[in-house]
Amino acid sequence: MDAPPRPRAWIVALLLFGAALALYARTASFDFVAYDDPAYVRDNPHLAQGSGPVRGAG
């Protein structure tokens, strides 16, 4: 039987999560960068075919 995680491990995990959230929180207000999306995503024949289970669904 595994021992339950120590409270200290939870504190460290929450601190790391909070630091990452604080670091990237401002990016939620950034506009989407679409300078190359038409060429690399929309017009890409490999992506248009799909991949894996999506490939045969179209």
Image (cartoon, helix red, strand yellow):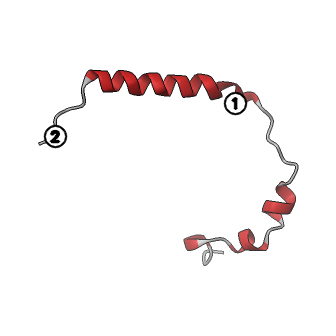
Q: Is residue 30 above or below residue 18?
A: below
Sequence-earlier tag: 2 or 1? 2
Q: Label 2 is placed on what type of residue? A: Asp
Relative side of 29 to 43, left or right:
left
The residue where tag 2 is placed is: 2
Circle 1: is it few (<14), some (14-19), or many (20+) Cα within 10 Å?
few
The relative height of residue 19 versus residue 56 in the rendered view (above or below) is above
Q: Quadrant of residue 23?
A: top right
In this rendering, the answer to whether 25 lies above or below 36 is above
At x 74%, y 71%, the residue is: 48
Looking at the picture, how far across and down is residue 40, in whole percent? 81, 61
In the rendered view of the protein, which quadrant contains the N terminus? top left
Q: Residue at x 16, y 40 (%)?
A: 2
Identity of the residue drawn at 64% across and 29% down: 24
Q: Secondary structure at mark 2?
A: loop
Relative image position of residue 50 (x, y in whole percent)? 66, 71
* Along the line of sight, the residue nearer the viewer: 26 or 49: 26
Residue 7 in the figure: left or right of residue 18 = left
C-alpha separation, residue under disc 2 versus residue under disc 1 = 39 Å
Residue type of the residue flagged with mark 1: Ala
Q: Nearer the viewer, mark 2 or mark 1?
A: 2
Residue 28 circle label: 1
Q: Quick one: 14 or 31, which is closer to the camera? A: 14
